[in-house]
Image (cartoon, rainbow, N blue to C red):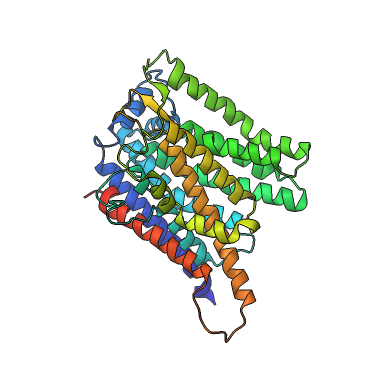
Amino acid sequence: MFYKKIWPAHYFLTALSCFFLIGFSHYFYEQGGLIRGQQSYAQQIYGGDYFVVLHPGVYWMASFLAHIGSWPVEDSLSWLLSIHVALLLCALIWALKLLDSNKADPYAYLLGAFAVMIAAPIGIPLVSPYVYNFTSYNRSAFLLRNGTHTAMLPYAMAVFGLLGYVLCTLKNTGVFLRRYALLAAILLCMSSLIKPSFAVSIIPATIIYMLFGRFSWKERGQVLYMVIPTIFLILCQFYIGFIHNPFAPRTIHLTISPWTVWTENNIHPVLSLLLAVAFPLFVLIYRGRKFYAPAIIAWMALAIAIIPYIFLMQVPGISSMADRDFEWSYLDARQILFLCSVAEWWKWMREEASEHAAGLPVRVRPVQLAGLLLILHAMFGYMRLVLIDMPK
């Protein structure tokens, strides 16, 4: 029927418009507020100053948009970040379609993307004061308060979907999809220019997976070529950020201080981590033997991102004694973990449906418990979005 073709697009456009309005209302409201520092960087680049920052991508784009549109650079930055909020939903839907080999219903992609987008750790009273504490263990990756992170997420999610699709195709058929790999390499560079938090965890995880996986050296080289340009870019960013920047000298350096950052506002770091990944962990316990390349890489990326978050600290911190810059990699790894776990959960549900004949008595199954955990993650993410991140 004709309406069946219209309604998926109708729901998609409605959801896209809603998320654009969320970003639009937030970033125009916050002009001169939480994104003041990012506006300052964009204004300096727009004014012709050769100001070099650790991740200049979003400021370059805002300056370019202000030049071609003759708008104030503050408005250009707000428009740009609002568009990227909507692009994040598109990127998540596309990534889910790439990771889902059996192609689910369009409604499932939309709901799955929404759940992954806002998923946050599950809150427990007296252990994680969820709504009232702006701490890392109850954040979702979809954090409107940081504009550069918001702008980076669409590219990161698209890269992970493309990477998973390329690796699964390579492992199953031996065919290397050059166009998809080239697009992934370009988007990975763009994500690192905007904020390198995603690249610093996904690149080592991909390299480890390719080196120890059952691939030929030719196949390993083909995949590793995707990440080599971004590796050089990250080295330049690290040099500018922590070693020498002639345009904006910094005195920040790194020091080893285990658990200082994570426990600054969190007295239960291990329990908080388990609450943050309850759904992916549950899927891992029941589906670990059937995991495919994207899920393995996502778990390795999470482990790699947690290590510096636990042991390293920037001194002096920008906003507190223990600056939280290493937290962004942990949040990014956690979101791609939810992304591939949702795709694996769909596969799990299909297998359950095929194994159980019609007429059997209804009973609680692990796949249903996994769905309940995902709903709880999305519910607490929605609470945070509405009660903390949205403008009052």
**Residue 223 versus residue 292 in the image, above or below:** above
Residue 385 percent across, percent down from the top left: 32, 52
Q: Residue at x 59, y 39 (%)?
A: 205
The reply to whether residue 151 is visible in this rendering is yes
| Residue in the foreground of this view, choosing between 293 and 246 | 293
Residue 355 percent across, percent down from the top left: 64, 75
**Residue 208 versus residue 114 in the image, above or below:** above
Q: Residue at x 54, y 59 (%)?
A: 283
The reply to whether residue 195 is visible in this rendering is no
| Residue in the foreground of this view, choosing between 267 and 42 | 267
Q: Indicate left or right for 340 with 117 as reference.
A: right
Residue 160 percent across, percent down from the top left: 57, 46
The residue positioned farthest toward the bottom in the image shown: 359
The residue positioned farthest toward the top in the image shown: 246
The N terminus, quarter of image: bottom right
**Residue 100 versus residue 353 in the image, above or below:** above
| Residue in the foreground of this view, choosing between 364 and 207 | 364
| Residue in the foreground of this view, choosing between 281 and 253 | 281
Where, by quadrant of the figure, is residue 49 drawn?
Answer: top left
Residue 72 percent across, percent down from the top left: 30, 33
Where, by quadrant of the figure, is residue 105 drawn?
Answer: bottom right
